[in-house]
Amino acid sequence: MAMSNSLYLLCLLHLLPLTSVSGSFGTLEEKQTHIKLYFHEIISGPNETSFIVAGPNLTSHVFGDIVIFDNALREGPDPSSKLIGRAQGTSILASQTDQSVLTAINFVFTQGRINGSTIALFGRVSASDTTAERTVIGGNGLFRMARGYAISSVVNASTESYIIEFNFHLIHY
Ligand SMILES: *[C@@H]1O[C@H](CO)[C@@H](O)[C@H](O)[C@H]1NC(C)=O
Ligand SMILES: *[C@@H]1O[C@H](CO)[C@@H](O)[C@H](O)[C@H]1NC(C)=O
Ligand SMILES: *[C@@H]1O[C@H](CO)[C@@H](O)[C@H](O)[C@H]1NC(C)=O
Ligand SMILES: *[C@@H]1O[C@H](CO)[C@@H](O)[C@H](O)[C@H]1NC(C)=O
């Protein structure tokens, strides 16, 4: 135990000179970016993109359900509009009183200048609100060091799919 503690301290000390270098980020210019896109989640049929993979009762949405999805990101609400990436993530039914969920999603872009860049989003979707605000906790590529928020609202819900508009407001380098 004592040995692992001192190893831990050694690692911390070793990291100290590195963290002091991080001040140089202050010279980089901050950018603001707004991105509007549509998330197409198919919940039934042959092209399903979203699945309940674990939970106390897989035939109904209850506290503890874990859903995994790999949804298309498109330019518009029309399912045939241009594909611009994937939303890969999980949602967990984390409320004991309603169907509010905790979500963690990587938005992975596959087109144009932002091909290969990602945005990481984390946050709660309340069962009773028509819009949700979630936190951008980071990004890669062009969105490195991103922070900000996304407002989402359902534009169409059916037994086959959910189409959700996302508006990202980002600050990044
Ligand atoms: C499923 O996807 C395939 C390939 O894109 C497409 O041809 C087919 O029409 C889709 N099926 C449904 C029910 O949307
Ligand atoms: C699971 O949910 C279904 C549909 O609501 C219900 O009929 C069933 O009794 C539930 N099973 C358990 C073990 O709670
Ligand atoms: C996106 O990047 C990947 C990996 O570099 C590449 O294979 C792909 O062709 C690119 N797609 C477009 C549409 O540029
Ligand atoms: C919503 O989705 C359903 C099923 O795909 C479709 O029939 C309907 O036209 C859509 N409504 C809107 C407003 O997009």
Image: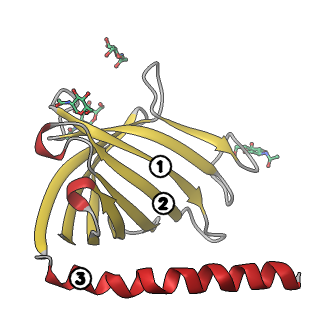
> Gap in Å between the C-alphas at discs 2 and 3?
33 Å
Q: Nearer the viewer, residue 143 or 163?
A: 143
Q: Are marks 1 and 3 in contact (CB under 8 Å)?
A: no
Q: Is residue 29 left or right of residue 132?
A: left
Q: Tell me residue 93's x, y (percent).
A: 59, 59
Q: Is residue 80 left or right of residue 2?
A: left
For image coordinates 69% across by 41% down, the residue present is 58
**Which residue is tagged 1?**
89
Please state which of the two labelled residues, at mark 2 or mark 3, is closer to the viewer: 3
The quadrant the C terminus occupies is: bottom left
For image coordinates 27% across by 43% down, the residue present is 116
The quadrant the N terminus occupies is: bottom right
Task: Identify the secondary structure beneath mark 2.
Answer: strand
Query: Which of the marked residues, 2 or 3, is nearer the chain's N terminus?
Result: 3
Q: Tell me residue 38's x, y (percent).
A: 23, 46
> Gap in Å between the C-alphas at discs 1 and 3?
33 Å
Query: Which of the marked residues, 1 or 3, is nearer the chain's N terminus?
Result: 3
Task: Identify the secondary structure beneath mark 1.
Answer: strand
Query: Which image quadrant shows ligand 3?
Result: top left
Q: Nearer the viewer, residue 40 or 17?
A: 17
Q: Tell me residue 43's x, y (percent).
A: 46, 35
Q: Residue flagged by tag 1: what amino acid is it? A: Gly
Relative to 118, say whether 121 is above or below. Answer: below
- Of all residues, the one furthest to the right in this rendering is 1
Q: Is residue 76 left or right of residue 105?
A: left
**Which residue is tagged 3?**
24
The label shown at residue 103 is 2
The label shown at residue 147 is none
